[in-house]
Image: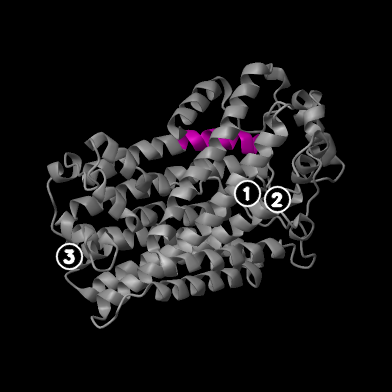
Amino acid sequence: MGFGDSDYPMKRIPSVGAASSHNLESYTEQSYSRDEVELARYGKKQQLRRNFGLLSIVGLTCALMITWEGTLTVFQSGLNNGGPSGLVYGFLFAWTGSMLQVLVMAEMASMIPLAGGQYNWVAILAPPSCSKFLSYLTGWMTVISWQAALASSAFLGGTMIQGLLVLNYEEYVFKRWHGTLLFYAIITLSLFVNTYFARLLPKIESMVLFIHVIGFFCILIPLVYLAPHGSTRDVFATFNNGGGWGTNGLSFFIGLSTSMFAFIGCDAASHMAEEIEKASTVIPRSMVASVALNGSLGFSMVIATLFCLGNAEDAINSPTGFPFIEVFVNATGSVGGATSMTSVIIAAMVFATVGVLATASRMAWAFAREKGLPGSATLAKVEPHTALPLYCIGLSTIISVLLALINIGSTTAFNALTSLVISSFYSSFAISAAVLLHKRLTTAPELMFFGPFQLGRAGVPIIVLALAYSA
């Protein structure tokens, strides 16, 4: 298992970089699509159906990142470690760092629009002496991060439904296995959409983008209008070290995972690359647009929620398990109103799980295509009638079903998946960005095979800053 030069002929043709635009035009004139030519450049052929455009892939990425919704769902960790001020400054820090990351990934995705994302980038850009090892390592980290993200999104959706049961029914007794069954319901729905309704997925994701934005205002307006407001000091100058760490600074960085988790998934478009028309142009635009839009909505929601927080201790200790539900109750003064608002967040989590399953399965399929997974000969198959990697969709579903069993024994153990998602994603990014930095510093500009999107002279400083943030 691993990657060799034979898999990526681009590594053996340094002249292609200088002549790529000319070659692309000549091939296109011979009735080959631009996307097919870009795949052929790396020894690949078109197997999946290209039916995503810019709007639909932005919808998929924004929906699975669920930045404003996701920030609310993991609010408790940030309130405990860092407090309101830690959440505000932590979000700005994570948003800036994620934008730097996405600019670097956009350049690589434009150069190498393959569904493997980070591991394809590393395999092609790394020095031959370490290409196989680094790409194999990156591939496994990326696969693990997306499988863990799939389980995390379904888990959050299931436990939020339990939170509403606690809120609405005093006699309801919270049981972990109830959450696991609700998890299974969400995963089953996601599997159904990703198979029977796969042809409609781009249209569904375009619709979800609309719901994502409208839902934001459906939460923001009643929250700001109805809830009592705290002072600016409560929001911008109140830190909390609920974890008992040595300093407030250390507590801030512990709680930073709340904001970092809200931007996980910004690389989703790169793993859908072989289903996007004009991928080398559309992917960079969608990455930047998704982080910009979600960051704006997320920061606005953080500020609004903190001003309407009320008693932070009551929110943290909410019997529902989610502080934002307690905030909604206090804002509306009504269980029904809070339930309606929370239902919007739950719907977002369900839609996110649909998108994460699509992305996780494509990542697994792309890695299996390179013989990186056990059983690759089977997992790399594409069902000819639907042009879907059904075996990898099934594999991703089974992994999540098995991971959900952990929750029955220990919610704390299952919650560790959040940390696994963040660490795996950041590690895979760091390797690919470091490889790109090495390539830029050791290769003459005229021999670099940039795609339509490139950072130019700003590339090296941006990569360095992105790596510093990721460390």
- Specify the quadrant that holds the N terminus: top right
x 26%, y 81%: residue: 169
Q: Are marks 2 and 1 in contact (CB under 8 Å)?
A: yes
Q: CA distance from mark 3 to mark 1?
A: 41 Å
x 17%, y 56%: residue: 313
Label drawn at residue 271: 1
Horizontal and vertical percent position of residue 207: 51, 63
In primary-sequence order, the first of circles 3 and 2 is 3
Secondary element type, mark 2: helix
For residue 40, which quarter of the picture? top right
Look at the image and tell me whether residue 347 can be seen: no
Q: Amino acid at mark 2?
A: Ala
Horizontal and vertical percent position of residue 76: 28, 55
Of circles 2 and 1, the one toward us is 2
Outermost residue on the front side: it is: 409
Q: CA distance from mark 3 to mark 2?
A: 47 Å
Residue that carries the numbered disc 3 in the rendered image: 330
Q: Amino acid at mark 3?
A: Asn
Residue that carries the numbered disc 2 in the rendered image: 366
